């Protein structure tokens, strides 16, 4: 309920905070991704985690432009 009642700006801010945590703990997430999926750590460090951060930042920006519309 809290997310559905949040304004586009509040959603954007929450996603930006989440992206910051992802970036700060990138190595932790890369290690977990590699262990859980059995993939090389280099792939997790250089592709998976940075891509997740980038996507989160992108959608944080997009959230400000939703204005109550649903996709």
Image (cartoon, rainbow, N blue to C red):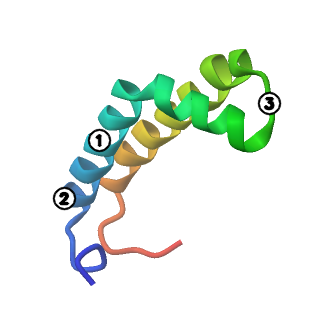
Please state the horizontal and vertical placement of residue 5, each as a whole percent of the image: 22, 79
Which class describes the residues within 10 Å of circle 1: few (<14), some (14-19), or many (20+)?
Answer: some
Please state the horizontal and vertical placement of residue 1, each as a whole percent of the image: 27, 84
Badge 1 or badge 2: first in the primary sequence: 2
Labelled disc at residue 16: 1
Which class describes the residues within 10 Å of circle 3: few (<14), some (14-19), or many (20+)?
Answer: few
Give the vertical position of 17 relative to 27 (above or below).
below
C-alpha distance separating marks 2 and 3: 35 Å
Q: Nearer the viewer, residue 35 or 14?
A: 35
Badge 1 or badge 3: first in the primary sequence: 1
Q: Nearer the viewer, residue 55 or 50?
A: 50
C-alpha distance separating marks 1 and 3: 27 Å
Give the vertical position of 19 relative to 26 (above or below).
below
**Is 44 left, or right, of 9 in this rendering?**
right
Q: Which residue is mark 3?
A: 39
**Is 53 left, or right, of 24 in this rendering?**
right
Viewer-nearest of discs 1 and 3: 3
**Res. 19 image quadrant:** top left
Residue at (40, 35) in percent of width and height: 22
Give SS at disc 1.
helix
Q: Which residue is mark 2?
A: 10
Badge 2 or badge 3: first in the primary sequence: 2
C-alpha distance separating marks 1 and 2: 10 Å
1 and 3 marks in contact (CB < 8 Å): no
Residue at (71, 44) in percent of width and height: 36
Residue at (70, 20) in percent of width and height: 41
1 and 2 marks in contact (CB < 8 Å): no
2 and 3 marks in contact (CB < 8 Å): no
């Amino acid at each position: 309920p809290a997310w559905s009642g949040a304004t586009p700006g509040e959603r954007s801010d929450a996603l930006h905070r989440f992206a910051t945590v992802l970036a700060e703990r990138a190595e932790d997430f890369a290690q977990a991704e590699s262990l859980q999926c059995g993939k090389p750590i280099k792939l997790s460090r250089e592709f998976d985690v940075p891509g997740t951060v980038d996507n989160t930042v992108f959608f944080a920006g997009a959230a400000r432009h939703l204005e109550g519309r649903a996709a």
